[in-house]
Amino acid sequence: MTDSVLIKNIEHFKKNLKQYLYYSFCDSIKPNYSIPILDHSVKYSLSDFYPMKFMDCNISSDKGLYDILQFLNQKKNFDKYQIILVDVGIFWRYYKWIYNPNNRIPGSRSTAVVLGFWHTYKELATLIYQRSIKYLFGPILGKLFSNCTILLKPKLGHIETYFNWFMLVFPLIKEQLYDGINNSSDLTRNILKY
């Protein structure tokens, strides 16, 4: 019985995925590329890295981003997959464009726009801070710095300092924190548990 239910659900998911792929405006799901296997005995470095061109456009504007993607698409070797490292704002704008039926993004078939690991780390730290400012960071920082304002979007260095303070003090307040979590409302409890 369990097998038949499982198989039925898998078939259902496959059908939905096929429809999604068919109607999706993102053509990077079916890329047309091959990835070369690099020789591990060769030492790779950026010593032979040269910029292709310095472009006279603002990548933060819609037109500038489009122009840069168009330029990279024209210069691209279509046998290779192209990875572009961008910041958070450009990352989200690019992926919003891909799924918008009114926009056609050049090069989306074999191009991936990715964040550096530090961007993901910063966004995660900022989200944790912002989601728990009302229940955790706000009250504690308000007690520590009673005459200062609490920043809604502090720099990563500040957030890391706050997190480090919590890690250092955690063994001393662990029992009180668990009691606070257990005696809190559902919303506060969920936020404090993270």
Image (tube, helix red, strand yellow):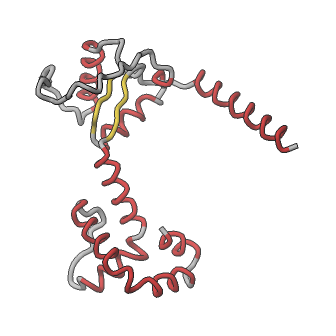
Q: Quadrant of the N terminus?
A: top right
Residue in view at x 27 percent, y 73 percent: 150
Q: Position of residue 8 (x, y in %)?
A: 80, 35
Q: Nearer the viewer, residue 2 or 27?
A: 2
Task: Spot the residue most to the front.
Answer: 41
At 26% across and 84% down in the image, what residue appears? 144
Q: Residue 70: which quarter of the image?
A: top left
Q: Position of residue 142 (x, y in %)?
A: 30, 82
**Looking at the image, residue 141 lies above or below residue 51:** below
x and y, in percent, of residue 85 in the image = 28, 35
Q: Is residue 94 visible?
A: yes
Judged left or right of residue 22, residue 100 is: left
Residue positioned most to the right: 1
Q: Is residue 40 above or below residue 79?
A: below
What residue is shown at x 76% (from left), y 38% (from top)? Answer: 9
Q: Is residue 148 positioned above or below 107 on the image?
A: below
